[in-house]
Amino acid sequence: MKQALEAEFTAFVADRGQALLRIAHALTGDRDAAADLVQGALAKAYARWPRIHGEAEAYVRKIIYNDRVSAWRRPMRRNEVTVADVPERPEAGRHDHDVTERLALREALLSLPARQRAVLVMRYLEDRTVEETAEVLGCRPGTVASQASRALAKLRELVGGVDDWTSRTEAAR
């Protein structure tokens, strides 16, 4: 019995691990932090696997969001990495327009408050409804809508073409 559950968990990680990592990366903006976030969520899920294996992905995603929110609430516990020199930024002419646009959007997204970023990730990257997003984040649907509205307004201010990006995402739904 235990070996079957372990095999099921291993298969789940192999099948859904990259998707979970993409979500965590979108939330953190850092690959290493995303990997740590997913690893911690999977460790918690493994401990409860006999009870959750049927709805594992939703459970693990909720752990990821909750752990990230907990990290936002404890800013003093963050590990800060300092560097001696600021990295050079690539020249805009060296990248095609799509890459430059994505980098600008990523930078603008990372400048948003964490809750607004989480709302946008869930609404546009995960294609969740307002109600689903509210349930996962533990708030009201009106809060999700207002956070999304504020976040998109800020992105419009920072990066042109956000409306094109969101309309392409919504058209794909």
Image (tube, helix red, strand yellow):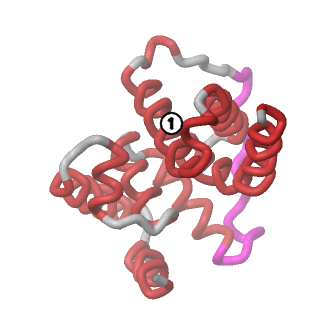
**What's the residue type where badge 1 is placed?**
Ile
Residue 142 in which image quadrant: bottom left
Q: As drawn, is 10 to the left or to the right of 37?
A: right
Residue at 40% in and 63% down: 123
Looking at this view, is 121 or 80 the one in front?
A: 121
Q: Position of residue 54 (x, y in %)?
A: 58, 51
Looking at this view, is 5 or 31 the one in front?
A: 5
Is residue 86 one of those drawn in magenta?
Answer: yes
Is residue 5 one of those drawn in magenta?
Answer: no
Q: Position of residue 77 (x, y in %)?
A: 50, 13
Residue 3 in which image quadrant: top right
Residue at 80% in and 41% down: 4
Above or below residue 49? Residue 95 is below
Q: Residues within 10 Å of mark 1 (few under 14, many from 20)?
A: many
Q: Say whether residue 10 is visible.
A: yes
Q: Say whether residue 57 is visible.
A: no
Looking at this view, is 143 or 131 the one in front?
A: 131
Q: As drawn, is 99 to the left or to the right of 173?
A: right
Q: For the magenta stretch, what is the residue range?
A: 83-98
Q: Main secondary structure of the magenta part?
A: loop
Residue at 22% in and 60% down: 145
Q: Quadrant of the N terminus?
A: top right
Looking at this view, is 8 or 163 the one in front?
A: 8
Q: Position of residue 146 (x, y in %)?
A: 19, 56
Q: Position of residue 153 (x, y in %)?
A: 28, 63
In the current view of this chain or complex, which residue is farthest to the front?
1
Q: Which residue is mark 1?
A: 63
Q: As drawn, is 158 to the left or to the right of 87?
A: left
